Amino acid sequence: MTIEMTARVLITAEASAVVSRLKEQYGALMFHQSGGCCDGSSPMCFEQGDFKVGGSDVCLGVIDDCPFWMSRDQFAYWQYTQLTVDVTKGRGASFSLEIPLGLRFIIHSRVFSDAELADLEPLRYTDDD
């Protein structure tokens, strides 16, 4: 019997379709959200391993087989919210893989309920697994 926990990060069908397209071109992918100014506060998509995560990052979960990492400083602000990765038309000013498609990933968020907070998926702090 598998117990489903509350996911910290989700992805829309539209964003998932873009991820599938990017996987065909680049292979395994990962997301990172740094919390920097401007586009740094948007989720960025990289080829797996092209962005080096470290002790200042935390993995919130996996969407479409892609780990979603966030800087710990940014996570301190977002820890009580469920994030949903979406996509919108328009070119961001980042190195994210979807930019040449004329698209950019964005985040929608909502605050967790008390019950969800008690049932969250565990975080991961290293890129070892």
Image (cartoon, rainbow, N blue to C red):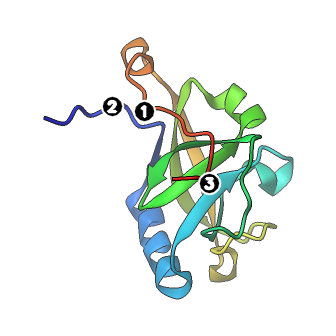
Q: Earlier in the sequence, mark 2 or mark 1?
A: 2
The front one of 36 and 54 is: 54
The furthest residue to the left:
1
Q: Can residue 5 be seen?
A: yes
- What residue is pinned by disc 1? 121
Q: Can residue 43 be seen?
A: no
Label for residue 106?
A: 3
Residue sitting at x 53%, y 78%: 22
In terms of secondary structure, where does tag 3 sit? strand
Q: Nearer the viewer, mark 3 or mark 1?
A: 1
Residue sitting at x 49%, y 60%: 66
Left or right: where 31 falls relative to 93? left
The furthest residue to the front:
128
| Mark 1 closeness class: few <14, some 14–19, many ≥20 residues within 10 Å | some
The furthest residue to the bottom:
25
In terms of secondary structure, where does tag 1 sit? loop
Q: Gap in Å between the C-alphas at discs 2 and 1?
A: 5 Å
Q: Earlier in the sequence, mark 2 or mark 3?
A: 2
Give the residue type at disc 2: Met
The relative height of residue 66 versus residue 6 in the rendered view (above or below) is below
Q: Earlier in the sequence, mark 3 or mark 1?
A: 3
Q: Are marks 2 and 1 in contact (CB under 8 Å)?
A: yes
| Mark 2 closeness class: few <14, some 14–19, many ≥20 residues within 10 Å | few
- What residue is pinned by disc 2? 5
